[in-house]
Amino acid sequence: EDQVTQSPEALRLQEGESSSLNCSYTVSGLRGLFWYRQDPGKGPEFLFTLYSAGEEKEKERLKATLTKKESFLHITAPKPEDSATYLCAVRLSGYSTLTFGKGTMLLVSP
Amino acid sequence: DARVTQTPRDKVTEMGQEVTMRCQPILGHNTVFWYRQTMMQGLELLAYFRNRAPLDDSGMPKDRFSAEMPDATLATLKIQPSEPRDSAVYFCASGSGGAEAFFGQGTRLTVV
């Protein structure tokens, strides 16, 4: 069965303390891996799409990378405003829908 | 500022009542998704439309849920009759082709 697993479930960092979030997937026929950010009471906000192993995307303090089995979201020198739940999702060949992991809740303390 | 608009933002209803949630997708997007989010299950796909045609509603309880797109600017999700276990946040998202999906702010449904 296709599966998307995110770890850790929750992560607490001090401001400036860099770390990485993991998204591992056991799917056949990956046609895109997506990262979203979700703030409390809001809908998921699109961050990145990665299509092939070795691909990297960056946006401010965030960098997403992709291998054949997992993706990492690296957060460099995070700030309190980076606190949110980060969701990853996969799109499979032949489908347009996204299958989501359960997310990592990130809290960055000043 | 193109965005997906959902109404209502919050809905509290009694068990057995009908609930209708509405979504206005981003103009020009041809795919619309309905997702449900709970603490236990995370985001689950309920239904998916392309060019207003339903392509996948396998995630939806068929006996009480229905989803439609009366026109390109409106998608609806209806629950009749509603049950307490339907309490969740319901998201609509729209997209174009195989690109990313953009989400609305959600409808928080509480069935008492």
Image (cartoon, coloured by chain):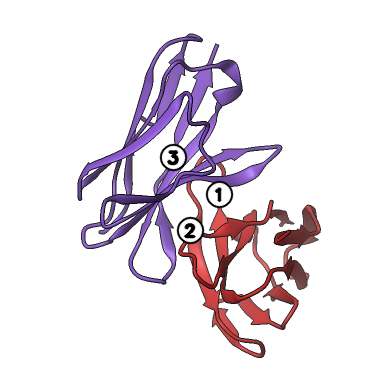
Chain colours: A red, B purple
Task: Determine contact: label 1, label 2, CB under 8 Å.
Answer: yes
Type of the residue with mark 2: Glu
Q: Chain under label 3?
A: B
The label on residue B60 is: none
Horizontal side of A76 relative to B86 (left or right) equals right
User: In this figure, which residue is indicated by the disc labeled 3?
Assistant: B106
Residue appearing at x 64%, y 44% in the figure: B42
Identify the secondary structure beneath mark 3: loop
The location of residue B35, given as percent across then percent down, is: 49, 44
Which callout, 1 or 2, points at the residue further toward the start of the chain? 1
The location of residue A96, given as percent across then percent down, is: 45, 64
User: In this figure, which residue is indicated by the disc labeled 1?
Assistant: A39
User: In this figure, which residue is indicated by the disc labeled 2?
Assistant: A45
Residue appearing at x 68%, y 37% in the figure: B39
Task: Determine contact: label 3, label 1, CB under 8 Å.
Answer: no
Instruction: Name the foreground residue: B70 vs A78.
Output: B70
Instruction: Name the foreground residue: B41 vs B11.
Output: B41
Horizontal side of A56 relative to B93 (left or right) equals right
